[in-house]
Amino acid sequence: MTAPTLTLQSEDPSDLTVALAGDWLLSEPAPGADELLERLRDTPVPKRVTYADAGLGDWDTRLVTTLLKIRRETETKNIELDESALPEGVRQLMRLATVTKPPQGAARKRENVPFLTELGQHTVAMFVGCNSLIVFMGQLVQSCGRWIRGEARYIRSDLVQYIQEAGAESLPIVGLISFLIGAIFAFVGIIQLEQFGAGIYTANLVGVAMVREMAPIMTAIVMAGRIGAAYAAQIGTMRVNEEIDALTTLGLNPMDFLVTPRVIALVVMMPLLTAYASALGVAGGLAVSLVMLDISLIQYVQQTISAVGLNSVFGGLFKCVVYGALVAISGCQQGMASGSSALAVGQATTSAVVQSIILIVVSASVLTVIYINLGI
């Protein structure tokens, strides 16, 4: 195998000869056309470029792509190009590669958009997304009304399946995360409170934090990643397969058939999951406290009961209902708005999780302010 070479020969500044030799194969390194391209751009620019066969051996697309670069440059500079010395196979491949012009606008162009323009575009997109979400929530309210009146058409076994997915099948991950969070809270609380001889109040810290805030919000975030994303992917895939259009053709309302059962399932199961998460969070704090503090099980339980009132319990349960509704609505809305491609389904799934978490954090802030003002 002979190394490929590309040699420039010029007896007349207006006439440039390109001598090709060796084996031009993809499996071997080959010289680029950079030197020749620079020569074509320098002054004086040659008027004619001619190929010469100086012992050209085996070749493949490596040679063709190099020659195409040279042809494009000569066309740009209006330089005459003589390809008669090239092998017939090379000329046929180059003819096939250039016989059809690419459609206008087919190539992606990277535009430098000014910062303010880009900011304005994102702002407009945000308001459009908010408007779509509000419209979707209005349609969901109407669908829930039909469901309450018994007019909604859906498969009851699907509702049971959604309840199982959002409930029993979510217990392991919710329980694990809640237990560990409770243990972390207890560890941090003990380290700080023991400096003042108030280690027993770790039970207050863990109990109030888990029941009022952490159990609802962590359960909601887990549900956003597990259930909200699944809703978006399921409905988005149905959009790709035109199953939603088929439901409409059959006279079934997609909101009644697909969205409302999913929302109801998650809203119903969130209080149970949150209560379960709160219990395991307290258990995690208890496990760490029994190891690090000189207290008994009864003392810890009594301290927790005295710290956690009914207002904290019901306040946390109400929060989780709101979070569950937001997660289900975000997942279903992004799925219904998905495009008809695999890429669009992936984007809808990502958007569902991001939108759910944002709504959870915003609603948590609003509810906390309301609770403080109401003395809850």
Image (cartoon, helix red, strand yellow):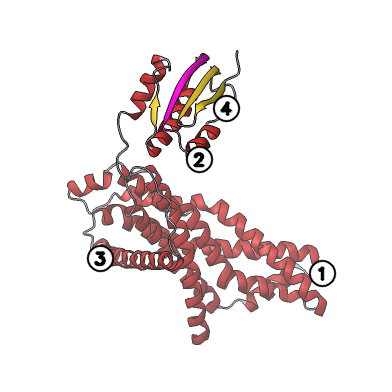
From this viewpoint, is residue 140 visible? yes
Q: Which residue is mark 4?
A: 31
Q: Is residue 192 left or right of residue 213?
A: right
Dot 4 crowding, Cα within 10 Å, few <14, some 14–19, many 20+: some
Image spot of residue 341 (x, y percent): 35, 43
What amino acid type is highlighted by mark number 3? Gln
What amino acid type is highlighted by mark number 1? Asp
- Checking the image for residue 294, the label placed there is 1
Dot 2 crowding, Cα within 10 Å, few <14, some 14–19, many 20+: few
Q: Secondary structure at mark 4?
A: loop
Which of the two marks, 3 or 4, is nearer to us in this view? Answer: 4
Q: Do labels 2 and 1 touch, CB within 8 Å?
A: no
- Checking the image for residue 42, the label placed there is 2
Q: Secondary structure at mark 1?
A: loop
* Pointer 2 or 4: first along the chain: 4
Q: Do labels 3 and 1 touch, CB within 8 Å?
A: no
From this viewpoint, is residue 59 visible? no
Q: Which residue is mark 3?
A: 142
* Pointer 3 or 4: first along the chain: 4
Q: Is residue 52 magenta?
A: yes
Q: Do labels 3 and 4 touch, CB within 8 Å?
A: no
What amino acid type is highlighted by mark number 4? Pro
